Every structure is written in structure tokens, then in C-alpha cells.
Image: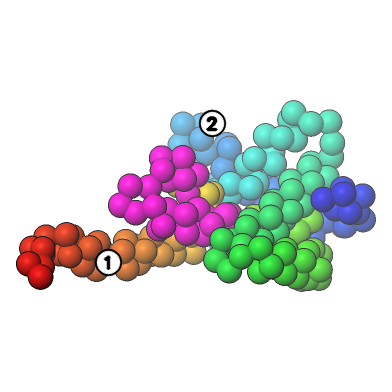
């Protein structure tokens, strides 16, 4: 986190950040116009993608006294650091503390991740949201049939964030369905065992 803070200004504007920023402006204009300004649906091919990050960055740009691209880079770096944290937590949840430590170190030292987490403002936030949602999906699957409301809400928020960036976020609901399907046979066999009469011997 500290290294990211000190190096965030060393990264230039990527070739598609201007386009992404304008896409965010068009999304905001669409809602502010009461759905009348529909330029957002004809701008490049970006209507195929979500603009959650771009909208949040524009909103923060009105609040924070920084250049809008510095805001985007800081926000993207924060999601990148969060992605490292939740990836480590997911590995820990699956295979223990050592796996969590290895996953955290490996992703931190991965140049493709660290280098991209300052200005790849769609891929990094999407990956972080997917990793976070996966962590809470694991927790939910272990709590079936009565998951904690907090875990369900956080999973829903992170899944929504992933969908707000890429349509691949729909995969999370496929995984959720698989978790429920996997749970059902165990639940049925457990109920069947409880229903068996006691052995007279």
C-alpha cells in the first residue's frame, strides 16, 4: 500500500483512459437527462461494458482537489491493493494461513498485476470485485442453508460491482447456483439419516 502511494504519480495516462472517462460522463448525462440523452449507447463499443469505475471516479473528482487522472490512478491502485488482500484471504480460507501468505506475496510481486493496477481501470477493479465476491461466496456456501445476512449482502454488493464493470460478473451467480446444487445432496442425505429408525441392537 505504501509503495503504491509513493509510485502512483509515476504512471502515465493509458491510451484508453480518456475514452473511459468520457464514457463515464455520458453515463452521468444519461441519468441526469432523465434517460433522454442516449449518446452513451452509440459511443464506441463501450455500451457493452459497465461504467461503474468511471462514474465513481468522476464523482470523486468533484470532491477531491486532484487532477481527474490522478484520481483515477489512486482509485484504481486502491482497488488493486484490495484485490491482493481478498485474494490472500480467499486462499487462506481454502488452504490455510500459508496459502494465504503465498497468494498475497505472489500477487503483490506479479508485475502484470502491480503495473496494471494504476491505470487499467476496468480489468483491475473487475478482478478485485470478482475475488472479493468469491471470498464471500465461499463463506456463504459453508453457511448453507442459513447464511449470515452480512455475508449475503456483501456478496451481492461485490457481485453487483463486478457486473457494473463487465458482464462476466454473471459467472458469480452461476457459481452460487453450483454451490447450492452441491449442498443439496448433502442436505438430503443428512435429513434421510435423521429420519431412519434407531437400530434396535
Is 130 colored magenta in this rendering?
Answer: yes
Is 32 situated above or below 141?
above
Q: Identify which residue is drawn at 46% across, 45% down.
A: 151
Residue 143 in the figure: left or right of residue 23: left
Residue 162 x, y percent position in the rendering: 53, 54
Q: Of 36 and 142, which appears nearest the observer?
A: 142
Of 89 and 13, the residue lying toward us: 89
| Residue 100 percent location from the top left of the image | 67, 64
Q: Element at badge 2?
A: helix
Q: Nearer the viewer, residue 9 or 183?
A: 183
Q: Name the residue tied to disc 2.
A: 32
User: Which residue is located at x 69 percent, y 52 percent?
Assistant: 82
Instruction: Confirm whether the magenta stretch covers residue 90.
Output: no
Place of residue 200 in the rendered image (x, y in percent of width and height, measured from the top left):
7, 67
State the CA–CA distance, disc 2 to disc 1: 50 Å
- Secondary structure character of the magenta stretch overall: helix
Callouts 2 and 1 close, C-beta under 8 Å: no
Which stretch did the figure color magenta? 127-155
Image position of 115 with respect to 65: above or below: below
Name the quadrant of the C terminus: bottom left
Side (left or right) of 64 relative to 143: right
First in residue order: circle 2 vs circle 1: 2
**Residue 176, position in %: x, y?**
38, 60
* Mark sitting on residue 186: 1
Q: Is residue 130 visible?
A: no
Amino acid at each position: 500500500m505504501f509503495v503504491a502511494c509513493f509510485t502512483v504519480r509515476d504512471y502515465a495516462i493509458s491510451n484508453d483512459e480518456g475514452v473511459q472517462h468520457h464514457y463515464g460522463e455520458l453515463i452521468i448525462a444519461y441519468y441526469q437527462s432523465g434517460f433522454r440523452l442516449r449518446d452513451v449507447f452509440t459511443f464506441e463499443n463501450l455500451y457493452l461494458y459497465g461504467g461503474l469505475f468511471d462514474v465513481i471516479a468522476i464523482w470523486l473528482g468533484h470532491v477531491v482537489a486532484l487532477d481527474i487522472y490522478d484520481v483515477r490512478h489512486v482509485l484504481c491502485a486502491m482497488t488493486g491493493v484490495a484485490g491482493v488482500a481478498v485474494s490472500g484471504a480467499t486462499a487462506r480460507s481454502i488452504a490455510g494461513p500459508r496459502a494465504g501468505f503465498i497468494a498475497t506475496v505472489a500477487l503483490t510481486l506479479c508485475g502484470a498485476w502491480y503495473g496494471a493496477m494504476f491505470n487499467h481501470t476496468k480489468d483491475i477493479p473487475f478482478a478485485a470485485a470478482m475475488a472479493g465476491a468469491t471470498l464471500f461466496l465461499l463463506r456463504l456456501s459453508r453457511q448453507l442453508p442459513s447464511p449470515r445476512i452480512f455475508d449475503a449482502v456483501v456478496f451481492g454488493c461485490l457481485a453487483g460491482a463486478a457486473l457494473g464493470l463487465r458482464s462476466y460478473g454473471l459467472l458469480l451467480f452461476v457459481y452460487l447456483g453450483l454451490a447450492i446444487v452441491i449442498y443439496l445432496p448433502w442436505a438430503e442425505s443428512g435429513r434421510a439419516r435423521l429420519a431412519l429408525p434407531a437400530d434396535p441392537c
